[in-house]
Amino acid sequence: MARTKPSDTVKVALVQMSCGNDPAANLAKAAQRIEAAAKKGAKIVCLQELFRSRYFCQSEDQRNFNLAEAIPGPSTDALGELARRKKIVIVASLFERRTAGIYHNTAVVLDADGSIAEKHALAA
């Protein structure tokens, strides 16, 4: 097996955390975890699925539609700024409101310059 040079290695961090009912508090908690991972050398940080809320996808409840947001939007703005500041890539799952009545569990990749590099709807 060939040995890799340190420049060939990319450190990836996976964030798994408990979430409460307050999306802003969950976003702040995720940001803290991202900061900690970046401080330990992570260049790519992946957040858990639908990290802004408790996981609600076991059943359809219209009250959860209030959790949806536009992409780009407040969460991608905050995560993009963090990615830019730390010069890291962040992968986040957000509950996206495409238009009235159209919602998706969407994976967003925020590049190290803070821009949205990719967006992919995971479920319709």
Image: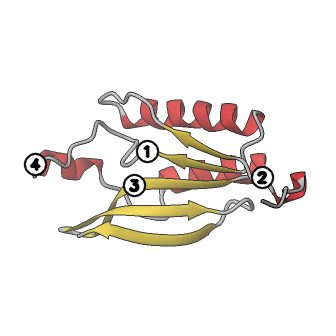
Which residue is labeled 3 in the image? 94
Nearer mark to the viewer, of 4 and 3: 4
- Circle number at residue 87: 2
In the rendered structure, which amino acid carries the disc numbered 2? Lys
In the rendered structure, which amino acid carries the disc numbered 3? Leu
In the rendered structure, which amino acid carries the disc numbered 4? Ser
- Circle number at residue 48: 1
Work out whether residue 71 or residue 121 is closer to the camera in this orientation and state it.
Answer: 121
Q: Is residue 82 left or right of residue 52?
A: right
On screen, 75 above or below 37?
A: below
- Circle number at residue 89: none
Nearer mark to the viewer, of 2 and 1: 1
User: Which mark sits nearer the N-terminus, 4 or 2?
Assistant: 4
Q: CA distance from mark 1 to mark 3?
A: 10 Å
Q: Is residue 82 left or right of residue 56?
A: right
User: Which mark sits nearer the N-terminus, 2 or 1?
Assistant: 1
Q: Secondary structure at mark 2?
A: loop
Badge 1 crowding class, 10 Å Cα cut-off, few under 14, some 14 to 19, many 20 or more, is: some
In the rendered structure, which amino acid carries the disc numbered 1? Gln
Q: CA distance from mark 4 to mark 3?
A: 17 Å
Identify which residue is drawn at 89% across, 56% down: 5
Identify which residue is drawn at 69% across, 51% down: 83
User: Which mark sits nearer the N-terminus, 4 or 3?
Assistant: 4
